[in-house]
Amino acid sequence: MPRHRLSPILGIIAGAALILAFPAFTALLTDWWWFQEVGYEVVFTRELLTRSLLFLVVGAVTSGALYLNLRIAQRGLVPYPVIVNAGPSVPALDLTRSLRRLSLPFSLVLGLLVGLGARIGSGCTSGHGVCGVGRLAPRSIVASAVFVSAAMLTVYVVRHLLGGI
């Protein structure tokens, strides 16, 4: 990709990252100032460490489980490699080998996203559904409604629009 086309894309990505990170950074800074004011910096650092470890542990466990599942699913599944020919001047692409190479980075990225989701969402789907709804917590009721709606939409799309894959 030419350099003049890459610059706007990188600028958009950097701007989006800044927009997404700014609220988290301001909340972190505000909390730090408050804990500093009341003399409990240790509590703040311990909470920050605990949240970071939660993110990393959940992300690592999910990455490992996903990678293991992908490797087991890919083992011996395709006896003949799937090769795509785009044209006579373009070399053939072996999709089977490419997917095997991408399974580890794919697992790492998705695992870290799950860890981030567990951190941002203040728990998992079953925790919100069982404990949060039972306590009538508004956040959990909204989260559970979103989960169920997304599941219903997925079933509808797969069964009716995609022909029941």
Image (spheres, grey):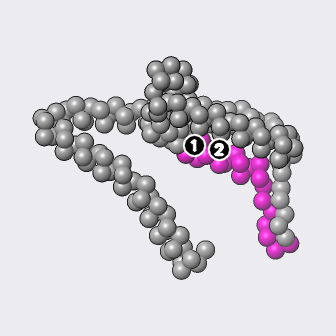
Task: Name the residue: 13% across, 36% down.
Answer: 38
Against 12, is 103 above or below? above
Indicate the quadrant where residue 85 lies: bottom right
Q: On the picture, is 113 further left or further right than 94?
A: left
Q: Dot 2 corresponds to which residue?
A: 103
| Local secondary structure at mark 2 | helix
Against 37, is 58 above or below? above
Against 65, is 33 above or below? below
Camera-side residue of 24 and 81: 24
Residue 165 location, x and y as percent? 84, 41
Instruction: Tell me the crowding category of disc 1: few under 14, some 14 to 19, or many 20 or more residues within 10 angstroms, Cα based.
Output: some
Q: Dot 1 corresponds to which residue?
A: 110
Query: Which secondary structure type mostly characterizes the magenta part of the structure?
Result: helix
Camera-side residue of 11 and 159: 159
Q: CA distance from mark 2 to mark 1?
A: 10 Å
Label 2 close to label 1 by CB (< 8 Å):
no
Residue 73 location, x and y as percent? 74, 34
Camera-side residue of 77 and 130: 130
Task: Name the residue: 40% across, 60% down.
Answer: 18
Q: On the picture, is 150 further left or further right than 14?
A: right
Q: Is residue 13 visible?
A: yes
Residue segment shown in magenta? 88-110
Task: Name the residue: 67% across, 32% down.
Answer: 69
| Amino acid type shown at disc 1 | Leu
